[in-house]
Every structure is written in structure tokens, then in C-alpha cells.
Amino acid sequence: MSKSVSLLLGVHAHQPVGNFRHVIDDAQARCYGPFLKVMHAYPDFRFSIHFSGWLFDDLNSRYPEDMKLLREMVERGQAELFGGGYTEPVLAVIPHRDRVAQIEKLSACLEKTLGKKPEGAWLTERVWEATVVPALADAGISYTTVDDYHFLCSGKKAEELDGFYTTEEDGRQIDLFPISEALRYRLPFYQANEVVAYLEGLAKEEGNPAAIYFDDIEKFGIWPETYAWVYEKGWLKAFVEGVLASPIIKTMHYSEYREKAKTRGVVYLPTTSYIEMNEWTLTVPAAHHYADLIEESKRSGKFEQNKAFLRGGIWKNFFSRYAESNWMHKRMLSLSARLEGLKKGKRTEAMKEALFEAQANDAYWHGLFGGLYLPHLRRAIYGAIVRLEHLLDEASKRDAKEVRDLDLDGFDEAFVQNGIQQVAVRLDGSASICEWDSYRLSHNFGDTLSAPSEHYHRKIHFNEGDTYSSGEIANPHERVTFKDRILPEDVKPNEGPKALFMERWIAGPSIVRPAYSQAMDASKYGLAFEAAMGGGKVKKRIRLDGNCLVVDYDFDAVGNGMLCVEINLAMPSCDGPAGRYRIGEDIMGGFGQELTVQNLKSLILEDDVLGGKLTLHINHGMGCYARPHFSVSQSEGGFEKIMQAVTISLSCRPEEIKGTISIAFQID
């Protein structure tokens, strides 16, 4: 018998819900379109492909000629379609009913448009929990792919991972293919002939071995330097031709291989994702310790032997690590439950679409590729959440006030809504507003992000230079570059959350945050609090008045000192040219600039991206200092500063003011 190896090559295409139009168009021009054109020219090269549903529908509408090539490849048996969740949710963190519905929607879309219903599914970020098995099976999926690392963590040996295994949960079963990390790091970063030689080296005379690859298609054109490498210098063409010319390598669909080969047996995988994700989910200093252990193991030459047992966190740790991610997630879950509890006759397709968009994974996590730090991706999630909530309220009215511990932090939050807007107020002693929604604009003005300490910040402190892989072009997993100039103060962690209406009392060198207790408030759309301050008391009242959010302060026997009120506002234009401060007819600057005004009584925040504006009204003049709030994150393009919010600090001396201080924001 001659040696042979089956190449199961799959690519995964995805863009986040809410991503910029120019980004998607650029991805089509530099990756999706060129990839399909090259592969279409080689009918004998079998491969598998997955598009998230949202992206597939977008490309099919805007680029029908390129998607026609995909249909032709499906019809002639060259391309195998993979399914998955329609908006690319992490299946493990949404309810079973939504898992099934998401998968079924994408499968139906592919069958209707391309004439083929998928049997396999792409698992978002390869996040594995055994609880997803029933949903995959119930939705008609027979197999999926996860990293070989998952199998190593279960005790399997690397040489055993050239085929597929079977697992079961709650009476349902699916087959699992282990994606080769060695191939993930070679394609397309090594010379095409080197990759072909590596594949040939995997061939055996017996056992029907498979070389299993499934990874982001964006590596073939969008990642730094890859467009020139893959297309202009002809890497993909050379690779395809090299594989087809090989007498040893045979390209095959996952479904074909599964029909011809036998399962290697039963396997039970631990809860995990790919190895890089296990570090990203950890907080500092745990992430430092984990990375040091990894590096120590590599220096000792024992990493390959030890890596399966050097596990970090799991994907769900992002919810405990980032309060903002956890809040979004719990808001989504609560609305999913409301939708499920609605009478079937009142449920609409618009509600379902909004829920699915709110479940898109990208804005819930952060790592080299996650989008939690990107305001426009969080805005898309909140836009869907607010839109869905408004639709549910129209179908089934809820109380004007609700109190519950939504985020499971041990403190209740009070939700107050009047059908026009809603605030969520923390009852943790801060009496701060953590969410402020406009139903007309489908926007949460409280959607900000604090700047936590991140593991990768120490790379900046160490002033490490660029490092590159042993391949021909830079691998983003291993590079350290800077898109912006980063200073030490830029990576200083924030103290506490970035919310709205957080107070400080300053008296000389003393700075105190008042600890509020909730007071009686008989009004339908209001909440009242009181706290000790400056030797006396301050009473704080939050109320909704039509399209105005009003916060009143009354003082009783407070001493000399200064009240400072911090308000963090999510303005969609961030530091772009579409957002500006205005006083009267005068433009005072953009949101990315600092603004200082004495005795401020009115300020307009105009935002063309928002499609509306906020007008700040103060009944007594207050000092105003507005500035952009930035965070430092790492992406495949390098370290960058991203504006998260407009921070407005208002200050006054209560002893100089008679009566109530009233601060109001009007939404127009």
C-alpha cells in the first residue's frame, strides 16, 4: 500500500454584527472575493467553508457575482457548507432553545440560497461545553470541529488526532474533528511548498489519516501583510497547485471522510477553547502567572508535553472579568426569557432577529481579536437589546419600576422606564446610573467601558520590540507593534466603573464618595436617595420626565466643600468628526478634545452617527470639565487607544447655591 493523507481544509468567514461598512467591503475586496475566485479555478480541490449568517446575507445581497461562484462550487461538489449559529453566538452561553433556533436559521438560509443543507457546524471560537451537544444534534448537525488542544486536555496523544471521535450528552451524539494547531500556525505563514511537504509527511500506509484544518479565512488576505503574500505573490495558488500535484495528498470534505473512515472511539472533552483564549480570560495577576508558567515550560523544553495540563480560564470567565460584558449578557438572557414567555401569537420575526443580534459573540469578550473594547460593536448589541425590549413592552406592558439583581453581584438594580427612556440605577450605595436607554434611538448612553489592567500591558512596560514567527510573514499571535503612542498614564487602571452621576465630596485634601441609602419616593418615574455629606446630608433624586433625565440634589447643613458629579456618556461618533460640543450657536470642539467652561448652564452634544443630540440643562451654573475617556487594547494591528466615552465633570459649592441643584439631559 502507498502512503496517503486526506486534507480536510475548512475556512471560516465572519464579521461582527454592527461592523463598519468599509471594513466589510475591504474584507470582501482583499479576502472573501479573491479566495473564492482562486478556489473556483481549481474544481478538483475540495474544501469546506463557513459563513456566519449575518455576513452571508450581506455578501449575497451586495456581491452576488462572487457568491454565485460559491454556489457553483457547491453544485459541482467542490465546496462543502458548514452551518452554525446565525449571528455567530457562543452557543455555550445562550439558552438551548436559542442555540437550536440560531443553527436552524443559518441551515435554512444556506439550503434556500445555495441548495444544500449543512451537516457540519462551525463552533464559535471553538468554545466547547458538553451542553452544546443536544442543541447541535437537535438542529440536525452531525459533526463539528474543535482544536486538537481540546483532545490533548482529555488525555489523547497527538499521534491519535488524525481522525474523528464521537461524543454524547443527554442521549444525543455528534462526531468531533480535532483541528491541527500545527496547520493553523503554518497556513498561510510558511512557504507553500513547505506546507505541502509537511502535509505529505503526515501520510501513512494504514489508518486513513486526515490532516485537519479549519480556521479564519481572514488569515488569507486581511491579517497584516497577508493580501500581498497570499494573492499578489501567489501563495494560495501555489499551495492549491502543490496539493493537487501531490500523489500523496487527497483533498476531501469532512462529510466524505466521515463516510469512508470510522470513528476513533468515544471521547469526552473538558470545557475549554483554544489555548490562547485560556490566557485571555484570566484577570491580572493570574494571567501574568499563567503566561510565566507557559514561558517557563517552553524554556525547559517540556511545553508540548505539559501544555494540555497548563490550562487557564474558560470563556465564561469574561463575564466575571468584565462587568460590562456580564451586564450585556444578563440583559440579553432576561429578554430571551421574556420573549419565550410571550404568547406565541404576539411573538414576531423582528423580536427574534433582535434577540439573535444581541447574542452575537464579538462584543462580549476581549483578546487579540475580541471586540469588547470596540464601542461600535457594543453599540450593536445594545441597539438590539433596546430594540427588542421596546418591542416586548409594546406587546406586553411591564411596570414602570422593577428592582432585581440582574448582574448577580449581590446588589439590586432599580429599572425605571416611561416608554420613552429607561435608566438602571445601582442600589449598591453609589446610586449611579449604569444604563440609560433611548427607545427611539435604540441607544444606551451608559454603554462605556472602564480601563482595567490587562496582561499585555506589561509588554509596553518592558518595551519589547517586534517578534516574528519562523515563517515568511509576521504572525499576529507573536507580534508587538504600536498603532498609537502609549504613555504610562494611558494604561493606569480606572478605579471602579465608568457610570453616570457618580458624586465626590471634596473638602480640602479629603475626597469622599457618598454612600447612599434609598429613601421613599412615591412618584411613578423616580427614585430618591440620601447620604451623609460634609457634616450634613445630601438628597439625590433621579426621575424621568418625558424625554428628559433629571437628577436633583438638595443639601441639608453641609459644610464648606465642593460637590463633583461625574457623568460618562457613550456618544457613537467618539473622537471622530461627527460629534461636537455646542453652546448656543458656537461649536466648542469635538468629543475627542478637552472642554473647560465656567458657570455652565447649557451644553449641547451633537452626534451625527447617533442621529440625535443631548442637551444638558443646569438650573445653577456649574464648572464643567469634559474630556475623552480612552482605554488601551491590543489587536492584530498592534496596541491602540480607543475612545470609550465622553466624561463630563460638573462641580459647584453648595453653600453658594440656594435651593435645589437640578441637572437634566434632554434627548432629541
Image (tube, rainbow, N blue to C red):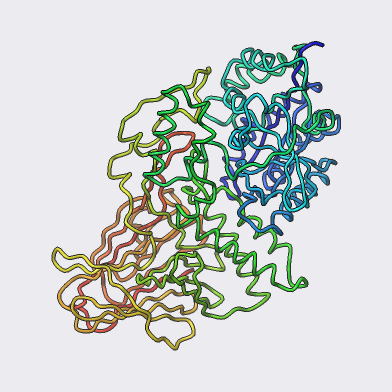
Q: Position of residue 146 (x, y in %)?
A: 65, 37
**Residue 15 visible (yes or no):** no
The residue shown at (37%, 50%) is 451
**Residue 396 higher or lower than 293, as above or below:** below
Question: In the picture, which quadrant includes the N terminus?
Answer: top right
**Residue 513 higher or lower than 487, as above or below:** below
Q: Position of residue 145 (x, y in %)?
A: 69, 37
The residue shown at (45%, 57%) is 323
Q: Quadrant of residue 237?
A: top right
The residue shown at (53%, 46%) is 314
**Residue 23 higher or lower than 220, as above or below:** below
Q: Which residue occupies the foreground of this view, 375 or 205? A: 205
Q: Does residue 112 appear left or right of residue 624 in this picture?
A: right
Q: Quadrant of residue 653?
A: bottom left
**Residue 650 higher or lower than 79, as above or below:** below
Q: Position of residue 252 (x, y in %)?
A: 78, 26
Q: Position of residue 520 (x, y in %)?
A: 40, 86
**Residue 489 visible (yes or no):** yes
Q: Does residue 200 appear left or right of residue 601 in this picture?
A: right
Q: Does residue 553 appear left or right of residue 422 in this picture?
A: left
Q: Which residue occupies the foreground of this view, 164 or 567? A: 164
The residue shown at (29%, 40%) is 487
